[in-house]
């Protein structure tokens, strides 16, 4: 499922509202064990454009899943 979620986010990354909606949905699909890797991937791929969206969506996971260079 992780690869599917990554594919969807890549395809909808042209639209901020759609990207955030799909990112929120992805958090319900991704397994807890994959969450840290998923968060890191999201920041690597989309932080340049959607850093504020990522911070808002992943904000509740900040202490549990730190990402180097993100803050």
Image: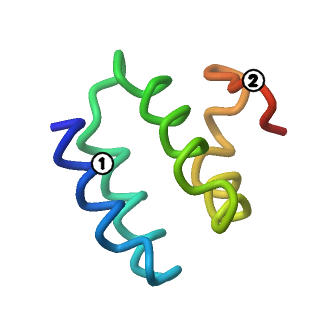
Category of crowding for the residue at label 2, using alpha-carbon neighbours closer than 10 angstroms: few (below 14), some (14–19), many (at least 20): few
Dot 1: within a 10 Å radius of its alpha carbon, few (fewer than 14), some, or many (20 or more) residues?
A: some
Residue 30 is situated, as x and y percent measured from the top left of the image, at 28, 35
Residue nearest the viewer, comparing 21 with 48:
48
C-alpha distance separating marks 1 and 2: 20 Å
What percent of the width, then of the height, locates residue 16?
Answer: 52, 80
Q: Up-down: is 7 above or below 49?
A: above
Quadrant hosting residue 57: bottom right
Name the side, left or right, on which 69 lies relative to 25.
right
Q: Please, which residue is most extreme toward the top here?
A: 33
Measuring 35% from the left and 22% from the top, which residue is drawn there? 34
**What residue is shown at x 41% (from left), y 58% (from top)?**
23
Q: Horizontal and vertical percent for residue 4?
A: 17, 47
What residue is disc 1 on? 6
Residue located beneath label 2 in the image: 68
Question: Residue 24's quadrant in the figure?
Answer: bottom left
Q: Secondary structure at mark 2?
A: loop
Q: Quadrant of the N terminus?
A: top left
**Residue 28 in the image: above or below residue 19:** above
Quarter-wise, where is residue 40 in the image?
Answer: top right
Residue 31, compared with residue 1, is above or below; it is above
**Across the whole image, how many numbered discs are drawn on residues?**
2
Q: Position of residue 2 (x, y in %)?
A: 24, 36
The residue closer to the viewer here, 41 or 22, is 41
Does residue 35 appear to the left or right of 42 in the view shown? left
């Amino acid at each position: 499922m992780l690869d599917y979620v990554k594919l969807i986010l890549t395809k909808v990354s042209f639209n901020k509202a759609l990207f955030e909606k799909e990112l929120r949905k992805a958090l319900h699909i991704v397994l807890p064990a994959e969450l840290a890797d998923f968060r890191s991937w999201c920041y690597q791929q989309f932080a340049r454009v959607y850093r504020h969206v990522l911070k808002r969506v992943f904000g509740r996971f900040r202490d549990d899943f730190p990402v180097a260079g993100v803050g």
